[in-house]
Amino acid sequence: MTLKPTTATNGKPSRRIFAIDAARGAALLAMVSYHFTWDLEFFGYVSPGLTAFGGWKLYARGIASTFLFLVGVSLVLAHGNGIRWKNFWKRLARIVAAAAAITVATRFATPDSFIFFGILHHIALASVLGLLFVRLPAFVTATAALLVVAVPHYLRMPAFDHPALWWIGLSPVNPRSNDYVPLFPWFGAVLAGMATTQMALRLGLLERLRSWSPARWAGPLILVGQHSLAFYLLHQPVLIGGVWLLSQIAPPPALSPEQAFISSCQASCRELRDIVFCTGYCDCMLGRLADEDMLGRLDRGEVDAALRARVADFASTCTAETDSAVEGGME
């Protein structure tokens, strides 16, 4: 199947850029692969913490960044020559409704980690804030993108550690959520997409993309990319339903809270330290959490400021003790 340029209502060829649809479709399929792995982890078929750390974490961030970059691209293409308010409000209403539906659904399905500000919530907010930048020079937009990405490295503070402010992204500790995409630093990806498109328009590069005639292999990607919201809303219920059916036929091996903690702890620790340190450190953390009956609370997601502070104390103590033990063993 080779796609031909579509025809607009006035009979003229559509100015749609199929390459952008294909890129969006590829990002959606990448998201399917990540969410499928996440579902396997959620049901216990793969190690706890697999998708939260290491390569899988980078993969997820790359997918989210790509989506938000393309949001910025679309904002400039749609409104760079003047904001089309009717189309803007219709699109925004669909996104807000979809984001609200995800919040309600996950509040019932996973109340301890429901999605209160995920990627759709971010896209809704970014669509509004992005209008401030659509007519600005690319240099100004690119500078703003760098500042947005840099802010969390310098301005995180306890004052932002409140549920009403978590959407900003400046809390010292990220809240527990299955999809958390706050304003900082993620709006930087949207602004980067806008700056790139502003520059591409100035240089005439987008006209070259418009001339691309998609081949047969790109057809499915373009189709998915042109119906991205519907695909996004439907893919996870289908995936998680399929894994649930599998769990009824071939249940995964059950892990105790202790086993789950050790697996997740070591996956996180191995991003920074070697296996010798991580083994001792995670054993130390497990022992201290068990002694104070905190493991169950962590496993259930019952985390408050006091528990975070206590866990941080344990982490400091266990780090010092493990470093001392490792150094002593090397002498």
Image (tube, rainbow, N blue to C red):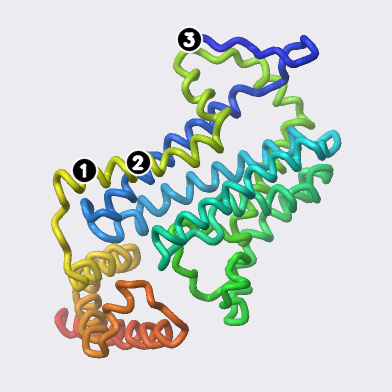
* Nearer to us: label 1 or label 3: 1
Q: Is residue 208 left or right of residue 313?
A: right
In the rendered image, which residue does mark 2 sit on? 239
| Label 1, residues with CA under 10 Å away: few <14, some 14-19, many ≥20 | some
Q: Earlier in the sequence, mark 1 or mark 2?
A: 2
Calculate the distance from the C-alpha at mark 1 to the C-alpha at mark 2. 11 Å
Amino acid on which the number 2 mark rests in the picture: Leu
Residue in the foreground of this view, choosing between 94 and 122:
94
Which residue is pictured at 53% across the width and 36% down the height? 230
Residue 154 visible in this rendered orientation of the protein: no
Rendered view: 210 above or below 92: above
| Label 2, residues with CA under 10 Å away: few <14, some 14-19, many ≥20 | some
* SS class, disc 2: helix
* SS class, disc 1: helix
* Nearer to us: label 2 or label 3: 2
Amino acid on which the number 3 mark rests in the picture: Met
Amino acid on which the number 1 mark rests in the picture: Leu
Q: Is residue 139 left or right of residue 231?
A: right
In the rendered image, which residue does mark 3 sit on? 1
Q: Which mark, by number, is residue 246?
A: 1
Which residue is pictured at 47% across the width and 56% down the height? 179
